[in-house]
Amino acid sequence: MNKKVPHDAILRLSFYLRALKNFEEENIKVVSSKQLADFLKINHHQLRKDLSYFGHFGKKGVGYPCSALIDKIKTILGLDKTWSAAVIGFGNLGRALSFYKGFREQGVYIKVAFDVDEKKINKEYNGIKVYSIEQLEKIIKKEDIQIAIITVPKYAAEEIANRLSKCKIKAILNFAPINLVTSSQILIQNVDFGCQLAYLTYHLKFLKP
Ligand code: ATP
């Protein structure tokens, strides 16, 4: 990974990608950075700076060719490949994420799930088989899983992450409300819905009724 690229610039690439797809759907072949930035309600200097981390795109005064930039951003983000994922903790959130078609559209396929609940183990839901957590290492190897999505309760998340770091897992998307940190060999993105909600409730306090 290129260490010089800021974390937020990588996240913003996904927004640029969505915006470009919108333009493409409207049959617009070329967009200027200003058009793209206005569409996203961001600063066009920011957009140009973000893209400049990855090379030179578009022609000065002409703009960016939508289709070529879409392909380029997909390649940069690894979205031109397919990835195998597993959901760990097949509760309400785990189930919802397993069936979310947006992941498949990004090339991320949830192949299997794991749980401790005997009522869920060995059952298949929309083609996703739930295995016992005891089989974690074996199935991850067998199915060649690269991404783990953790949706177990907080008390179970750390142990799961430690076990995953000993498998060949490359990345973890963690939804358990705990900041997981493991070895440098494994990438972790912690997603905390509670924090995002608190951001909204903080601002809501200042809104006039
Ligand atoms: P449900 O009511 O269907 O269990 P839930 O979303 O309320 O769903 P949670 O308590 O949030 O359940 O737990 C999420 C899921 O994680 C559950 O399916 C639970 O059985 C599972 N789980 C809990 N501990 C572990 C563990 N150590 N390993 C794997 N899965 C676990």
Image (spheres, helix red, strand yellow):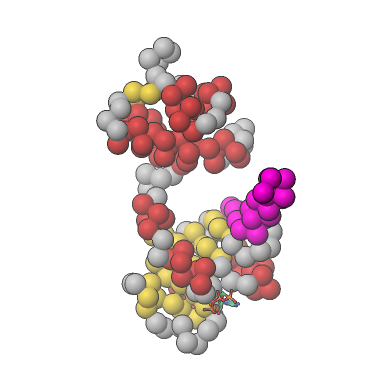
Q: Residue furthest left?
A: 27
Identify which residue is drawn at 55% across, 30% down: 42
Report whether residue 142 is seen. no
Q: Position of residue 13 (x, y in %)?
A: 49, 37
Q: Nearer the viewer, residue 36 or 191?
A: 36
Identify which residue is drawn at 53% across, 23% down: 44
Q: Position of residue 12 (x, y in %)?
A: 53, 37
Please determine whether, in this image, residue 144 is positioned above or below residue 187.
below
- Left/right placement of residue 188 relative to residue 135 reads right
Q: Position of residue 166 (x, y in %)?
A: 59, 65
Identify which residue is drawn at 39% across, 50% down: 106
Counting labels gives 0
- Left/right placement of residue 208 relative to residue 188 reads right
Q: Nearer the viewer, residue 159 or 17?
A: 17
**Residue 103: which quarter of the image?**
bottom left
Magenta highlight on residue 188: yes
Report whether residue 14 is seen. yes
Q: Residue furthest front?
A: 209
- Left/right placement of residue 108 relative to residue 165 reads left
Q: Nearer the viewer, residue 95 or 150?
A: 95
Please determine whether, in this image, residue 12 is positioned above or below residue 100.
above
The quarter of the picture where the N terminus appears is top right
- Left/right placement of residue 23 relative to residue 49 reads left
Q: Which residues are magenta?
A: 186-209
Q: Residue furthest top?
A: 61
Q: Position of residue 41 (x, y in %)?
A: 52, 31
Magenta highlight on residue 47: no
**Residue 25: which quarter of the image?**
top left
Identify which residue is drawn at 45% across, 31% down: 39
